[in-house]
Amino acid sequence: MKRALPFLVIGGVVLLLVAISLATPRPYDPRLRAEREGTEPFDSEVLYRLLPQWLGAPVEPVDVTPFERLEDSTITGAAYVFVTKDFAPDPAEADRLLRFIRRGNTVVIAADQLEGPLFLALGRQANPPPKSDTLGADAPLSKIEKQDSGSSTLAPGLFTQWRPTPPPAPLMGDFFESQIEPDGSVLGADTLRVGRRTLAFPVPIDGAVLGGLDSTRTAILSTDLESGDATAVAITEGRGRVVVASTPLAFTNAAIATPGGGADYLEALFAYVPPVRLVLWDDTYKPFRSRASTLAYASRTPALRWVLWLVGVGVVLSVLVWGRRRQRPIPVVSPPPNAQREFARTVGRLFFVRGDRDWLAARKVRLFEDALRTRLGIADADLSDATAKLAAARAGVPEDEALALFARLRDLASNPTPAALLAADRDADAFFAARHLAPA
C-alpha cells in the first residue's frame, strides 16, 4: 500500500485538475477567424450553413488557392465567397479572378483591408494623391470625395479606410446577453443603412469604409449611418459582378446568430448575387491559416521567381565546376612480380655454389619429366627411348635430337659435371621452345 500511495496521490491531483479544467467556463476567442466549422463568436459557421438557403445552390469548400481552383476556365454560373481580414491576391491570382468574373460569375469579398491589382481594376482609375494632401490619412472618405469628386488626385482603385476613431474592441464576457434589453430590443453596437432600413448589430462590426468607387459601374448596397460612407457595394465587371463589404465581422456567428440586424443585413446583401448553380467557399484566405507553401508563393512573385532561377543556375554551375575530382591522381600500382621463379633461381644457385650436383641433376630430371606430362601430354613420362620418340613426334623436333637429349639426361645422374648440367638445361629449354605441336 505504501508503494502505491505516491501513484494514488498523483492520479488524484490529475483528476482534480481535469475536473477544474472542465468546470471552468472557457472564454470566447475575440479574434476574427471566419472559419466555416468554428463555434467561436467570430467564426462563420452560421453563414456557411445559411448560404445554400439564401443562394439556392450547394456550397463547396475550397482548400486550395483561387489560382489553382480557377485553373478550369469553363466554370460558369458560380459564386466565390471570401470572408477574411486582409484580401490581397497577387497578380496571377487577380488575373484568374477577373477572368472568372468576366465570364458571368460572382465574387463576394468581405474584408477590411483590400490591396493588390484586383482592386486597382475594380475601382476608380486615377493617379495617387500627392503628398501635400491637407486632409490627411485619417480624414473621412466622404469629406475627401466632397472636396474634389473629379480630381485626378484621388487614390486609384478600390480601397478601404478606417474611421478616424478606431472601432471599439468586441465586448468581453457575456456580451451576447448584455446587448439585449429586457423588452427584447437590441442595443446596436453599430448601425448600417441598407436601402431605407437601418439595421443595428449586437457587436461592433463597422470599422472600415470603402473608397475609390467607380460610380459608372458601382451600386452602393449599405452605408455607415454616421458618415454616409459606403460599407458594401456591387461592382459590374464584364458579364459578372463583385460584391465587396468592408465589414467582415458582420459575416460572423456573433453578428448573425445573436438577435439584431445581422441576418437581415447578409440576406439583403446576398440578394444581389445572381442565380448560381454552385457556391465556392474559400478556406485559404483566413487570418490564422497559411494560404500556400513558400515555394508556391515564390513561384508567383516575379522577384522571388528570379531568385529561384538564379539559385537553380548557381547549383548547376557549382556541380559542373566543383563536381570533378579535387584530390591527387591515384598512382598506378603494378602487380607484384612472380616470386616463384626468383625463388627457384636462387635455390638453384645455392645448390650450384655448394656443389650438390647430384641433387641438381635429379631435380632437372624431375622438372623435365613434369614438362613432358603437362606440356606434351605424356602420362607415363620417363627417359626411355620410346618416350623420346613419342616426345619428338609430339614436339615436332627431329627424332635423333630427342634421343640425344634423353641419353644426356640419363648420363647426368652418373656424371653431373657443371658443363653437363648447363648443357642439359640449355638443350631442354631449346627442346620445348622450338616445339610446334601438330593439330589433333
Image: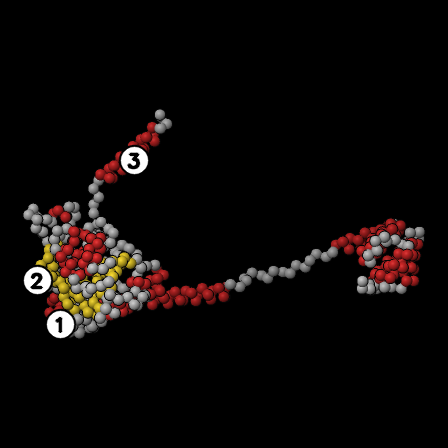
Q: Residue at x 93, y 54 (%)?
A: 411
Describe the element under mark 2 as helix, strand or loop.
loop
Who's the residue at 83% across and 53% down the image? Answer: 379
Percent across and percent down for residue 160 are: 19, 63
* Amino acid type assigned to the residue bearing label 2 in the image: Arg
Q: Earlier in the sequence, mark 3 or mark 1?
A: 3
State left or right for residue 431 relative to residue 79: right
Mark 3: amino acid: Val
- Residue nearest the viewer, comparing 238 with 317: 238
Earlier along the polypeptide chain: callout 2 or callout 3?
Answer: 3
Can residue 353 be seen at all in this image of the molecule? no
Q: Distance between the residues labelled 3 and 1?
A: 68 Å
Residue at (53% x, 64% y) in the render: 324
**Would you name the residue on which mark 3 appears?**
14
The residue under label 1 is which amino acid type? Ser
Instruction: Give the labeled residue for mark 2.
Output: 196
